């Protein structure tokens, strides 16, 4: 390889993301300095947070700079090393972005054991999305056995883990997802007790049937109508882990009609950003890794082929076209 490909942010979106927000570039292969290593990325993770970074609005993180490699988590293999702690062939996780390769000095690079856990799972159930599920569930929702929890985007990277961890803890797990196929998967494959298809047109009634004892805790990934319907079914002292609001990432308004429930049911809502809780990652990843290695924690992936497919796959993620963790296969 004399050159490699990367995708940069070419322009900022106004409303929906469009293909011309991105630009594919060919770059000369970098020459390693002493203390550096070169990684061939095998998988790129596409995540909803990238939509927020494409904008210049005030947020928890700085915006993605224009004309630079799009931010993103990657897993891959060391193909050249001038670093004492990394050898050619080591599998690593890094933040090399939408790029076929990455150069690192070893900082923030995690060596991966792929003997019992597939490489790609380190971007999903045993990576940032899994940790997001683990953090929101164990630190904010704190569910007790017998309680009912609801999670939106239930078939996705984060939501699928939330429900399975809740089942492990003896809860009734109810998902909300878009479409009959996703709902079937959530119940039949992932083992949730019920899943409400918000696209079927009977959201309130279907949620009421799925939560006969009300809702004790919500893991909110979407916002909008599903969240509003949950508020109306909350039990006293219910907890809400506000993880994401993907229904509004393109600037759509998200009205809530059932705000009164916060007062009448004495609810607690806590927003969180998983990367601010790195101290808990070893604990969470240990549980998640064990569950994946033993086959107890199931996950599904949508895999787009080749770096060129990343913009389209990303636009699909923001419209629910993915089914499970959205990845791009680069090798
Ligand atoms: N706070 C944190 O630290 C943190 C970390 C990671 C992720 N997150 C958030 O967690 C949520 C889930 O992330 P993920 O990586 O697991 O993604 P994902 O669930 O694998 O994929 C996104 C899903 O969101 C749903 N969706 C997309 N557009 C929608 C829309 N306009 N209205 C309603 N639903 C829509 C779709 O599911 P359906 O087809 O079922 O609608 C889609 O499959 C996102 O909101 C993300 O921003 C937060």
Image (cartoon, rainbow, N blue to C red):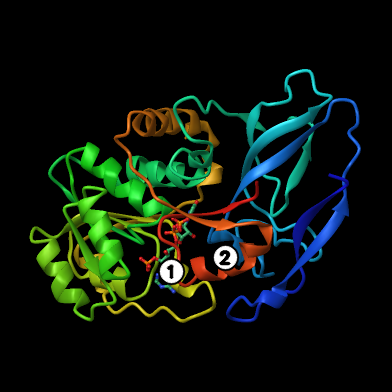
Q: Is residue 195 visible?
A: yes
Badge 2 local density, few (<14 within 10 Å), some, or many (20+)?
many
* Horizontal side, residue 270 vs residue 307: left or right: left
Q: Earlier in the sequence, mark 1 or mark 2?
A: 2
Q: Nearer the viewer, residue 148 or 18?
A: 18
Residue shown at the point (86%, 54%) measured from the top left: 27
Residue depicted at x 52% and y 71%: 249
Q: Is residue 313 left or right of residue 94?
A: left
From the top left corner, tell me how far across and down residue 46 is, in percent.
57, 56
Which residue is denoted by mark 2 in the rendering?
A: 314
Q: Is mark 1 within 8 Å of ligand 1?
A: yes
Q: Looking at the picture, how far across and down is residue 212, in whole percent?
A: 8, 61
Say which quadrant the N terminus sits in: top right
Q: Looking at the picture, how far across and down is residue 15, in whole percent?
A: 59, 81
Q: Nearer the viewer, residue 106 or 245?
A: 106
Judging depth in this view, the residue of 274 and 290 nearest the camera is 290
User: In this view of the protein, can residue 53 be seen by the observer?
Assistant: no
Vertical side of 288 occupied by 84: above or below: above
Q: Which residue is mark 1?
A: 320
Seen at 80% across and 23% down, the residue is 83
- In the image: residue 198, left or right of residue 48: left
CA gap, disc 1 to disc 2?
Answer: 10 Å
Q: Secondary structure at mark 2?
A: helix
């Amino acid at each position: 390889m004399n050159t490699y490909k990367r995708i940069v942010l070419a322009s900022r979106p106004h409303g929906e993301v469009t293909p011309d927000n991105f630009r594919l570039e060919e770059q000369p292969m970098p020459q390693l300095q002493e203390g550096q290593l070169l990684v061939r990325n095998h998988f790129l993770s596409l995540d909803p947070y990238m939509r927020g970074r494409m904008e210049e609005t005030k947020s928890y993180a700085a915006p993605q700079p224009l004309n630079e490699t799009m931010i993103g988590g990657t897993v891959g293999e060391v193909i050249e090393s001038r670093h004492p702690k990394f050898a050619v062939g080591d599998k690593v996780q890094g933040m090399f972005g939408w790029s076929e390769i990455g150069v690192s000095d070893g900082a923030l690079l995690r060596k991966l054991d792929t003997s019992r856990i597939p490489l790609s799972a380190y971007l999903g159930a045993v990576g940032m999305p899994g940790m997001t599920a683990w953090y929101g569930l164990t630190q904010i929702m704190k569910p007790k056995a017998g309680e009912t929890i609801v999670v939106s985007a239930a078939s996705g990277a984060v939501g699928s883990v939330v429900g399975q961890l809740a089942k492990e803890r003896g809860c009734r797990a109810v998902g909300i997802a878009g479409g009959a196929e996703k709902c079937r998967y959530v119940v039949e494959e992932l083992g949730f007790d019920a899943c409400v298809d918000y696209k079927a047109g009977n959201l309130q009634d279907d949620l009421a049937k799925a939560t006969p004892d009300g809702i004790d805790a919500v893991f909110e990934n979407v916002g909008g109508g599903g969240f509003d319907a949950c508020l109306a079914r909350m039990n006293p002292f219910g907890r809400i882990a506000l993880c994401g609001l993907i229904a509004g990432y393109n600037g759509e308004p998200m009205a809530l009609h059932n705000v009164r429930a916060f007062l009448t049911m004495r609810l607690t809502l806590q927003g969180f950003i998983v990367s601010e809780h790195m101290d808990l990652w070893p604990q969470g990843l240990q549980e998640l890794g064990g569950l994946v290695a033993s086959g107890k924690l199931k996950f599904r992936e949508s895999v787009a082929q080749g770096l060129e497919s990343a913009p389209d796959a990303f636009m699909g993620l923001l419209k629910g076209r993915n089914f499970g963790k959205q990845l791009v296969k680069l090798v």
